[in-house]
Amino acid sequence: MLTFYGKSFESRLMLGTARYPSPEHVRNAVLKSGAEIVTVSLRRESVGGDKAGHAFWELIKALEVTVLPNTAGCHTAREAIKTAEMAREVFGTPWIKLEVIGDNETLQPDVFGLLEAARELSAQGFEVFPYTTDDQVVAGRLIEAGCRVLMPWGAPIGTGKGLNNPFALKLLRQTFPEIPLVVDAGIGAPSQAAQAMEWGYDAILLNTAVATAGDPPAMAEAFALAIRAGRTAFLSGLMTETDLAVPSTPVFGTPFSPFAG
Amino acid sequence: MVDLAVVGAGPMGLVTALMAARAGLKVAIYERADDFSASAGWKAGGMLAPECEGETSDGTVVELGRRSIELWPTLVEGVKVDGTLVIAGRRDPGMLDKFADQTEGFERVDSDQLAELEPALSGHYARGLYYKNEGHLDPRVTFTRLKKALDHLKVKFHFGWVGVLDSLPAGRVVDSRGMGARDRFKELRGVKGEMALIRSHDVSLNRPVRLLHHRHPLYVVPRANGVFMIGATTVESDRGDVVTLRSAGELLTQAYALHPGFAEAEVLEFNAGLRPALPDNNPVISVGERIVAVNGLYRHGWLLAPGIAEDLVRVIYMQATKVIHARPSQR
């Protein structure tokens, strides 16, 4: 069971809801993948009045899955805090996926602004899911700030470049065995998601890889299968890699072996 | 008393009225606003690009759009069928191949062929996709021409009309109110689009050009006298009347990226509108005993209006009473 802030889930796949051809595709992707958590953005959609994105948000609510609102598009802690407060009102949840972007080209998190916003929001009773880099020290500080989930990137948002720094991601897993870890960005293919799950990651958050696929619902299903495969492999205990060949069937001493008498 | 009252003077309403009037029905048009500028179609690009729309739309839109391109020249003058050119920036080389995978009806062009099609882009792009059967029209000019054609057929316009559909003095009613029909279509939502009009003395294009981009895809549609329509953002928002600084910046930056010559263009207009959309972003025709409602044309008003209008007029003649999706199979 996957547990975030006391809530448990069967599915380890989380879906973003942006960039799909239509809301109907979002719905079908959720159904086909069995995803139980979806993220939704509010920043740009709320221009022109707090409820401007209302109609789309209602469709998301109608999916009857857990909604994790995000602060995508925010570049300062203050902006992110304001968006989180609005999200709590719109979706009636203390959950917030916290994004504070520090660089417009790479959409790399501004970890300083992130930490500041995570502290403030945790103090206000929010349950924060911070989108962060794979930096160990920042991860530790976010946990000190009250975060009980970490969402490190695999690669920059929307690039599909996969798990760019396996060393750092594996180390993060070893350093924080008790904290749920979700790879949040950069995943392009189901094999990459399976890889992270084999390393012991708790869940994968996807958006672009599914939304821009030729058949988004089918791709969501492919990811769900890969994530289940990776998780099962992790729990089963992977074999140890060696440099020397080890035959799976011993040949020494069998009747047809050249060494037999 | 008329045979048919059309409510909503957007592309859908006007084309339906024209086809019905040509079929011999006595028609009147009712519009809430004082002119055509409240329609989503007023701010549209006017691209007739069923193949390119196949990237994100299903077969319904592609098939209806192909049918509509054949019908447009029978309705008004000025519809151009010179194709669409699709290109990608240097930093997004893979996007052109992906776009090709998701669409049909194109030929690949190299830098020489591209320069022949669009001399202004010569040297800027190494390859592209050319959709030769696609077209475009100027929405605002087309509104005027449709009005003229309807005036000629003695179709009466009632602008600034506020009233109840049920009490209209007509045999049948077509409800083509777009965003105004939320009372009928509960799942209808607005999807905001922002656009700009610019005038350039340095760049000229023969046809709509789409620039693929990992973050901000853009299209530029040439209009008369050096004017270009630049569009369009897509935001899941129900407030359609504001253009944000970020959107304006994205649109202009991308136009400049498409061709540096646009740097000296004049900005004539920024505008925003709401595309009426249903959850699957496909159109729907809902047939009642007296009222036939059509909606959900999303960003495809000009693209789909003739094909859907043909279906609508047939429904009106058949007196059918059921909900159907506008599909070519129901011809």
Image (tube, grey):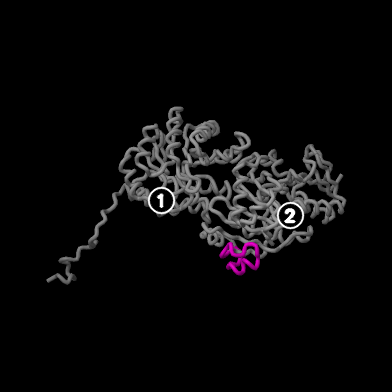
Mark 1 vs mark 2, CA separation in Å: 47 Å
Residue B270 at x, y = what percent? 68, 45
Please check the rendered image and state whether residue A133 is part of the magenta-colored stretch, yes or no.
no
Taking depth in this image into account, of A28 and A161 the one nearest to the observer is: A161
Please check the rendered image and state whether residue B115 is part of the magenta-colored stretch, yes or no.
yes
Which one is in front in this view, the residue at disc 1 or the one at disc 2?
2
- Amino acid type of disc 1? Ala
Left or right? Give the position of A200 relative to B1. left
Residue highlighted by disc 1: A193
Taking depth in this image into account, of B220 and B102 the one nearest to the observer is: B220
Residue A164 at x, y = what percent? 39, 51
Tell me the number on the disc at residue B265: none
Q: From what the image shows, is residue B69 above or below residue A50?
A: below
Left or right? Give the position of B34 relative to A114. right
Residue highlighted by disc 2: B138
Label 1 marks which chain's residue? Answer: A
Q: Point out the stretch of residues depicted in magenta.
A: B104-127
Query: Would residue B286 be visible to someone looking at this image?
Result: no
Helix, strand or loop for disc 1: helix
Residue under the point 59% across and 37% down: A46
Examine the image and state in which quarter residue B149 appears: bottom right
Residue under the point 67% across and 44% down: B272
Q: From what the image shows, is residue B135 above or below residue A159?
A: below
Residue B225 at x, y = what percent? 75, 56
Contact between labelled residues 2 and 1, with CB atoms less than 8 Å apart: no
Q: Quadrant of the N terminus of chain A?
A: top left
Left or right? Give the position of B60 relative to A111. right
Helix, strand or loop for disc 2: loop
